[in-house]
Amino acid sequence: MPIVSYSIKQLNKLLVEEYSMEVIVESLKQLGCDVEDTAEITLYRCPACDALNDKLTREEPAKRCAFCGHEQEANFEKFASDAVVRIDLLADRPDLFDVVGLSRALKGYLELEQGMPVFACDKGKIEVNVEP
């Protein structure tokens, strides 16, 4: 099963309210998520492609880009630090595979939003004609 890491800062931004790591972890457990652990990560910027590479804070700084493959002897520039929660997800919950879906589920559990979401939908510009 995939283990997915979610930024607590990004999750709180989507929830609109600030929740502690403990509240988020307990809420995720109540939603049936298998929380692996929590960790502190450091983001490093690749000098070649500007992609952000993450490493656990206790690991060696990034020297090789996971996106473009650029490698150098000096450490990449530190960009930011963040706390993450790591969840072992089941394949039958693809709605939780990204931070937006996870925040939608948490909003319901934390009673920030209730009921089915309502989305605005305009008439499309594509017309399909089917002949027998």
Image: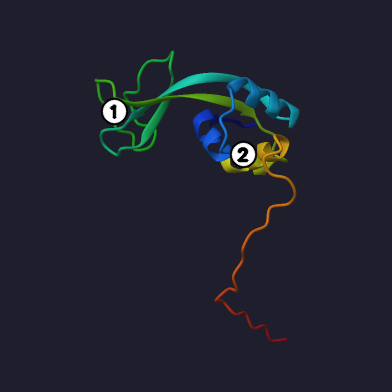
The residue that disc 1 covers is 71
Crowd band around label 2 with a 10 angstrom C-alpha radius: few (<14), some (14–19), many (20+): some
Q: State left or right for residue 92 relative to residue 14.
A: right
Q: At 73% across and 86% down in the image, what residue appears?
A: 132
Snapshot colouring:
rainbow
What residue do we see at 68% from left, 53% from top? 117
- In the rendered structure, find residue 99 and report the number of the disc placed on it: none
Report the amino acid beneath label 2: Ser
Mark 1 and mark 2 in contact (Cβ < 8 Å)?
Answer: no
The residue that appears at 58% across and 43% down in the rendered structure is: 100
Q: Nearer the viewer, residue 120 or 54?
A: 120
Front residue of this view, candidates 95 and 103 = 103
Image quadrant in which the N terminus is located: top right
Q: Is residue 65 left or right of residue 83?
A: left
Which is in the foreground here, disc 2 or disc 1?
Answer: 2
Q: Nearer the viewer, residue 102 or 56?
A: 102
- Looking at this view, name the residue that lies furthest to the top: 58
Residue at the spot 59% in from the left edge and 25% down from the top edge = 86
- Residue 103: which numbered mark, if any? 2
Which of the two labelled residues, at mark 2 and mark 1, occupies the earlier sequence position? 1
Say which quarter of the image contains residue 78: top left
Amino acid at dot 1: Glu
